[in-house]
Amino acid sequence: MRVAVLHTGALHESTLGYAQKGVCAARRLAYQWTSGDLVSVAVVWAPKPHGFQSGCARFDSVHVLQWNASAASRTTTAGHQREAWRALRVAIDAALDLRAEWMFRVRFDAHVSAWNVPLPADALWEPDCIYGFKQSWGWPSDNALLFPARVGRALFDRRLPDPLNEWRLAHAAGMAGLRFCWVRVDVWLFKPERAVLGTSEGS
């Protein structure tokens, strides 16, 4: 069973070391689930930071995208979400080209230190499951998800109506005939200062 780890999102110089550790942590987890049949994909925004790919932070496929300022400026939140889903779609397509059967999506600014998914029986997980965790307000988090590769394009389809958020993810999962299989996790997000993010809303 081939698992692809998908890393997308913004990389900031001030948190680059944390991002590298996060990439390595996700890889260690995913390696436990496979017999070594593991690939990794990175989609970053231009300009790509220098010195990021080192040690275990190496990837089988790397894509650098230009930020679509006109799309992102429609509304701060919805526009940024649409660009984030564009990056995810590129990562999913790359993983499908690498013949992935499952995908573990982890944001660059996330550190997953525990992901208590059942070890796959007979080298397979439940084919109708998206393994994830609930946020405090009850919706599934899209910061880290484990899902069958065959449904990746349907889950993160930018043609879906706004807002492309957790509710939309849950709706897309239901339309694809999937259910959320909740797992206990330990996931942390790390962010630079608001001034670096360029948003008054912060994060």
Image (cartoon, rainbow, N blue to C red):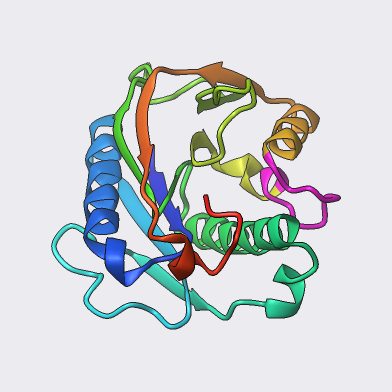
The answer to whether residue 34 is visible is: no
Residue 98 is situated, as x and y percent measured from the top left of the image, at 44, 58
Residue 39 is situated, as x and y percent measured from the top left of the image, at 34, 53
Residue at horizontal 43 percent and vertical 24 percent from the top? 124
**Magenta segment, principal secondary structure?**
loop
The answer to whether residue 76 is visible is: yes
Residue 38 located left or right of residue 41: left
Q: Is residue 80 above or below residue 151?
A: below
Residue at horizontal 60 percent and vertical 21 percent from the top? 180
Residue lying at the far right in this picture: please name it: 161
* Image quadrant assignment for residue 70: bottom right
Residue at horizontal 33 percent and vertical 64 percent from the top? 60
Residue 88 located left or right of residue 195: right
Looking at the rendering, the stretch of residues picked out in magenta corresponds to 154-165
Q: Is residue 40 above or below residue 199?
A: above
Residue 71 is situated, as x and y percent measured from the top left of the image, at 75, 72
